[in-house]
Image: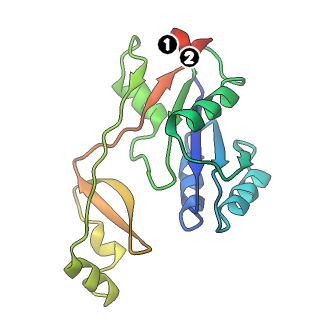
Amino acid sequence: MPAFFALLPVRDEADIIGQCLDHALRWADEIYVFDTGSVDNTWEIVQEFASREKRVVPMRKEPVFFSEARLRGYMFHVARQRMREGDWFLRIDADEFHHITPPQFVKNCMRKHETVAYHQYYDFRLLQSELDQWNRGEETLKDRRRPGCTQSFYTALMGHNFRQEIRGADIFVLLEKRGSNPAIAR
């Protein structure tokens, strides 16, 4: 059975990092976390999770310029020391959640010869009238959970996290199988 390694760069995610780690721990064999300079208590929350769950691996906290390729490349370099041929790694963000876990997706939606799954993003905006309803207490998270909805995600607006439901939409993050690319496998 292949293992699944999550690479999670964070910065100022204290409001959601706990939910993110709880969710990812349902499917990830290891979660590598690099804090790029949070000024809130994101790093402390990550360390607290790591103290009780060995699959959370706090790499370090360092104020660095975020470069997707460089940072995730470094994180992959560290994580691959524990990976075996056939294991999978994914890039995740603290505010993205999977309604189909990556292991389920690989098992049920990918063929044996497929080694990469790309992602699709959806951006949603709340209207001012919707924000006003939310602030007046006229709409709740329960109201947002309507039948037929299959996808959950979080979007930040004006410092608040609003749970939204998407009808029939799938969001996949990049999954890559170790050994699928000669440059990655070495």
**Quadrant the N terminus occupies:** top right
Q: Residue 119: which quarter of the image?
A: top left
Find residue 184 and name its label: 2
Horizontally, residue 98 falls left or right of residue 75, namely left
Q: Residue at x 36, y 22 (%)?
A: 110
**Quadrant the C terminus occupies:** top right
Residue 118: x and y in percent read 36, 30
Q: Residue at x 52, y 33 (%)?
A: 69
Residue 174: x and y in percent read 42, 33
SS at mark 2 in the image: helix
Q: Residue at x 25, y 55 (%)?
A: 166
Horizontally, residue 11 falls left or right of residue 128, namely right
List the single residue furthest toward the front. Answer: 65
Measure the alpha-carbon separation of dots 2 and 1.
Answer: 5 Å
Amino acid type, label 2: Ile
Image vertical order of residue 56 relative to residue 72, above or below: below
Residue 73: x and y in percent read 58, 30
